[in-house]
Image: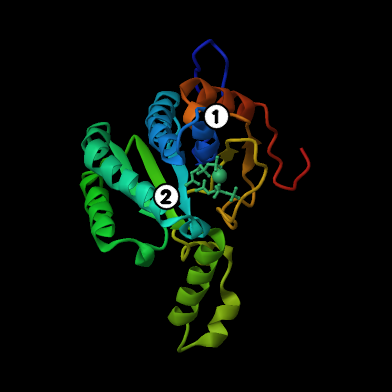
Amino acid sequence: MEEFKGNTQLKVPTHVSIIMDGNGRWAKLRGKERVYGHANGVESVRACVEAAVENGVRYLSLFAFSEENWGRPAEEVNTLMGLMFKAIANEIEALRKQRVRFRVLGDYSRLDPSLADAIRAAEVSTVPAAGEEPVLDLIIFLSYSGKWDILQAAKRLAADYKDDPAALDKVGPEEFAGKLVTAGIPDPDLIIRTSGESRISNYLLWQAAYSEFLFVDTLWPDFRKNEFRSALEEYSKRDRRYGKVK
Ligand code: IPE
Ligand code: IPE
Ligand code: MG
């Protein structure tokens, strides 16, 4: 339990994950192109990073681009990748100074090699010095899908055991989770989806097994610090039972 502004006692989730949805509709409401919504969505990312740090959230993960989003018009895909490039160029130094560790998880093989290189360099530059703990881990899911993650984990596991397939029998969920791209990251306590859609859209399928879900009508470019804090308040009211009797 941590002290919360307004003297409300909050149970602060360790890991908050957000399916950032509704940029296109936000732009349309203003008579603008979809890309205008994406550009304004970047401001919400900045606000949520600040809010996560201020409220003591240790991991913030954001679904930025799904495997299925590759099927959008090339112009929109290029804009989204360009925004990622720009955000890395403009924001990484500030994140590093705030001791935020930046990571991007997903299928890198589909990314433009120059973007993949920029991401890797940004990741390396925010790795904390030996013995230092980051204030926040900021994880961006890019070119990601839950089914892809589970499949790549299964393939890697099978490769590891190719000389002793009988030993696969002993593999448990923890070892399997160690093959997912999220290895070492605690499962999300709270998954928020903006824009009024109540679905998971092939996001963290394995890792969401016991996450609390919060679906809000707010469109992503309008989801700022107050909305983030309201989500934490809502999480505080949840009773997580994990299948047991309390
Ligand atoms: C979220 O907003 C951004 C991505 C999925 C990349 P959308 O682009 O899905 O916006 P809507 O849902 O069409 O309003
Ligand atoms: C989910 O949003 C993916 C991301 C937020 C990156 P979409 O807008 O792609 O999802 P659907 O198509 O409405 O399910
Ligand atoms: Mg959408």
Tell me if residue 158 comes above or below residue 102 in the rendering: below
Q: Quadrant of the N terminus?
A: top right
**At label 1, which amino acid type do we have?**
Leu
Which residue reaches farthest bottom?
163
Which of the 4 image quadrants contains residue 102?
top left
Q: Is residue 1 visible?
A: no
Disc on the earlier residue, 1 or 2: 1
Mark number for residue 29? 1
| Residue identified by numbered label 2 | 76
Tell which residue pokes out farthest to the right in this image. 245
- Residue in the foreground of this view, choosing between 135 and 92: 92
Picture coordinates of residue 130 (x, y %)? 22, 46
Judging from the image, what secondary structure is the residue with disc 2 in? helix
Query: SS for tag 1?
Result: helix
Q: Residues within 10 Å of mark 1 (few under 14, many from 20)?
A: few
The local crowd at label 2, few if under 14, some if 14 to 19, many if 20 or more residues have their Cα within 10 Å, is some
Assess whether mark 2 and mark 1 are in contact (beta carbons under 8 angstroms): no
